[in-house]
Amino acid sequence: MCNNKTRASFQGALALPWNKKIHTVYSNNIKTARGVLILSLNTNKRIITIGIFGSNGKTSTCNLLSRIFNSTGVSIATINDKKQASSQRIMTNIELYKRLIKLEYNDIIILEINDELLKCHEIYDIRFDILINCGISEDSYEYSAEGMDKIKRLINSLHNSKILILNTDDDIWKNNMFFNDTYLITYGLGSKSTVTASSIDYGDKLEFCYCLQRSISTLNGKEIEPMEIPVTLKAVGQHNVYNGMAAVTSALFCGISPDNIRSIMDGNLKITSGVRTIYSNNDFKVVDNLCDTLLGFETGFEAIQNISYEKMHLCFNFNSENNAPKEKLLGSIGAWIQTLKIKNISIFKYNLDSDDLDLIKLWGESFLKNDVDILLWEATEYSIEKIIGLLETNDLLAFFCSNHLDVLREKLTEILDKRILDRNSLIKNL
């Protein structure tokens, strides 16, 4: 549990020293995340704390907000549960602790609140200054009755004058407006939202006009009048409009001036999550998108429309344990087949049972008329190599797998990196 010293560190907390660094702590289990929280918050220094919850968009919003703070010199620490096959995975708790105590958490801590943290009672002892709500997919834990109860408890743990930045375009909030003594700021594309966006242009870069439609009072009591900020990001997809609105709003509340935000959002800022191009050459392209929910697939498909290619090869795995989300996912993929020019679909047999195989067979038969091949693979490096071998010139491989296949995701990156190195060596020898 967080002690009184920890609790006190959240009250007020507005002075922002400058010219500091960003520290990111990747935590791949709840025990470590809990320890990181206690370590980072148990300090005499006054800290602004920002929590980001939701099933989709947390990391993109966190990364964008981190870059805004970094560009203005604010010292921040970001804590998330990035699950990758990296040195962090084999690091012992003692080694991680030694590394953590060397970090200086000075000004702002941003915490991505995943479903595991929502189930952890320590999270409700943290005095968040700002809570940001990102997208909630209907097949996610957050959307369930239990998950919504946890979110309700998290929100109502905020004290008077603390800020909740809420995406009211999410249908889930229509029957769940339960906020007590909370400074509520809504964002979305509707005209009634506190923050909205206009003049949206989805091109090589994402452009929109951030619109603050009523005055707000920042954490240090400064009034900001209604205004507009032009935003240009190196990103694609409507979901990044929402991530951008959430990040800009949070930065304003933390004291970043509108003029500074205007200069930062000039087109050089890149959102480093969501659909990422991990290989692009004269032969083919490969993009990676972490898909733990149906919304992750939908936002990924939307973003891919801005990429030039001939045919798509889609790779994915089931992440849900019940059939309803699986059927919805297959229906969504089917609806996108013609638009995205999907040539074949590779499904990894990770945790598949006989019912899943029957479901895939029935679904596959309905798409034979579209000349789409459906392939089942073991989740191995050999399978990745075979899938790459199916690609033709200017094809696109879309790796839309959940975090359960992060080891395979790393293998894909290694294979592609080796391909680049081998090609460079060949060129040098010519």
Image: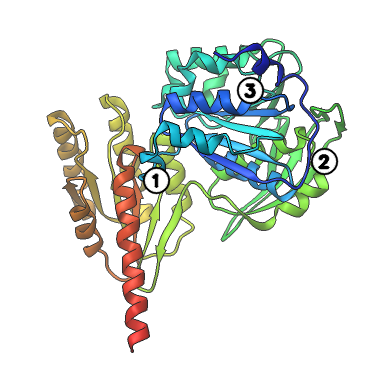
For residue 176, say whether it is visible: no
For the residues marked 3 and 2, what is the alpha-carbon distance in whole angstroms? 38 Å
User: Horizontally, is 279 left or right of 126 in the view?
Assistant: left
SS assignment at label 2:
strand
Q: Earlier in the sequence, mark 2 or mark 1?
A: 1
Q: Earlier in the sequence, mark 1 or mark 3?
A: 3
For the residues marked 1 and 3, what is the alpha-carbon distance in whole angstroms? 27 Å
Q: Earlier in the sequence, mark 3 or mark 2?
A: 3
For the residues marked 2 and 1, what is the alpha-carbon distance in whole angstroms? 45 Å
- The residue under label 3 is 42
Residue neighbourhood size for the residue with mark 1, other residues' Cα within 10 Å, grouped as few (<14), some (14–19), many (≥20): few
Residue neighbourhood size for the residue with mark 3, other residues' Cα within 10 Å, grouped as few (<14), some (14–19), many (≥20): some
The foreground one among 172 and 53 is 53
SS assignment at label 1:
helix
In percent of width and height, residue 390 lies at 22, 63
In percent of width and height, residue 241 lies at 61, 44
Numbered disc in front, either 3 or 2: 3
Q: Quadrant of the C terminus?
A: bottom left
Q: Quadrant of the N terminus?
A: top right
- The residue under label 1 is 87
The foreground one among 111 and 378 is 111
Q: Identity of the amino acid at label 1?
A: Ser
Q: Residue at x 56, y 20 (%)?
A: 173
In percent of width and height, residue 292 lies at 38, 35
Q: Residue at x 41, y 26 (%)?
A: 140
Indicate whether 428 appears above or below 305. below
Numbered disc in front, either 2 or 1: 1
- The residue under label 2 is 227
Q: Residue at x 22, y 38 (%)?
A: 350
Q: Identity of the amino acid at label 2?
A: Met
* Residue 90 figure quarter: top left
SS assignment at label 3:
loop
